[in-house]
Image: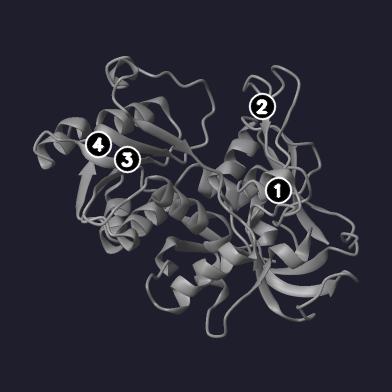
Amino acid sequence: MKAAVFVQPGRIELTDKPMPDVGPNDALMRITTTTICGTDVHILKGEYPVAPGLTVGHEPVGVIEKLGSAVRGYTEGQRVIAGAICPDFNSYAAQDGAPSQDGSYLVPQGLCGCHGFKATAGWRFGNLIDGTQAEYVRVPDAQANLAPIPDGLSDEQVLMCPDIMSTGFKGAENARIRIGDTVVVLAQGPIGLCATAGARLLGASTIIAVDGNTHRLGIARQLGADVTLNYRDCDVVDEVMKLTGGRGADAAIEALGTQATFEQALRVLRPGGTLSSLGVYAEDLRLPLSAFAAGLGDHTIRTALCPGGKARMRRLMNVLAAARLDLGMLVTHHMALDNIVAAYELFSHQRDNVLKIAITP
């Protein structure tokens, strides 16, 4: 089969690989649509370490090609998705309520530039096992991780569910949003846009979307933002304080992964507010004394790795099937798997107002 593999920092290439073997608890999925994520760009740049030769990608939409002998309740030929995070729900972490943290482990100091912490085994596709930018992918623990696609939903409609929608919604959920809250969402890439949509669904009455791209700010309006701020044209913290009468926002969702946006997220909060962090950070973060109120501000800082599993995927697809949300506008480009290198070039340089690229084998 054809697969996009990590070669070395700066190089992801299309190559031929053997078809995956399927164990009794696995399923073989024929990929019909997948996409590129910002985390894949971190891998491409060498900012997040994976093994050379690993197939990258973690957002699968497809059809069950083959089922392991122990998998029940599914049929070959069935349209399915699997979450980007596909944990073993028998793990301690899963049974303690944190399935995305299934099997967290360390790598030697300095290997990944992040003080010995690599990631979590809950994130397996394109991290610990071969991923989804290929013609086929092996789905581990398939009975817990495969979710049937409802009739009437297209590949593109559900393409955001495995990662982007799940992550963005988790950001809104972690922000502890209550009806009537004011929420600031910093960065309106695909995940930030889904966080904006999630904040609206959870009942926020004022959603302030921040970005430097006017096109993305326009989409944020369509997905539920009440106010948009272009950070190139204003001081974001000052504007939020004006909009809230000096009180500050109830919650801030940081969806980029930079020191600047993290600090802004802290500074726009009211005392007792919640910072929900979704960004993948490539270097150490600092907590500024004043923004952190010297540790006396009763702030809550929560981080997240997108939830996976069939129950999570079912809920997300229910939102789409019920027409509560349309994320089709996030798919801005279409490319064949044969053109994956060009797709990475386009996506990593954020040209042509790209948001998400539908990749089809």
Q: Residue at position x 39%, y 77% from top?
A: 323
Secondary structure under tag 2 reads strand
> Do residues under tags 1 and 4 come within 8 Å of each other at their CB atoms?
no
Is the residue marked by circle 3 packed among few (<14), some (14-19), or many (20+) residues within 10 Å?
A: many
Residue, disc 2: 117
**Amino acid type, label 1:** Val
Q: How far apart are marks 1 and 4 (CA)?
A: 33 Å
Q: Residue at position x 45%, y 62% from top?
A: 332
In percent of width and height, residue 117 lies at 66, 27
Residue, disc 4: 231
> Do residues under tags 4 and 3 come within 8 Å of each other at their CB atoms?
no
Residue, disc 1: 56
In percent of width and height, residue 85 lies at 65, 52
Q: Residue at position x 76%, y 43% from top?
A: 128
Is the residue marked by circle 4 packed among few (<14), some (14-19), or many (20+) residues within 10 Å?
A: some
Q: How far apart are marks 4 and 3 (CA)?
A: 15 Å
Q: Distance between the residues labelled 1 and 2?
A: 20 Å
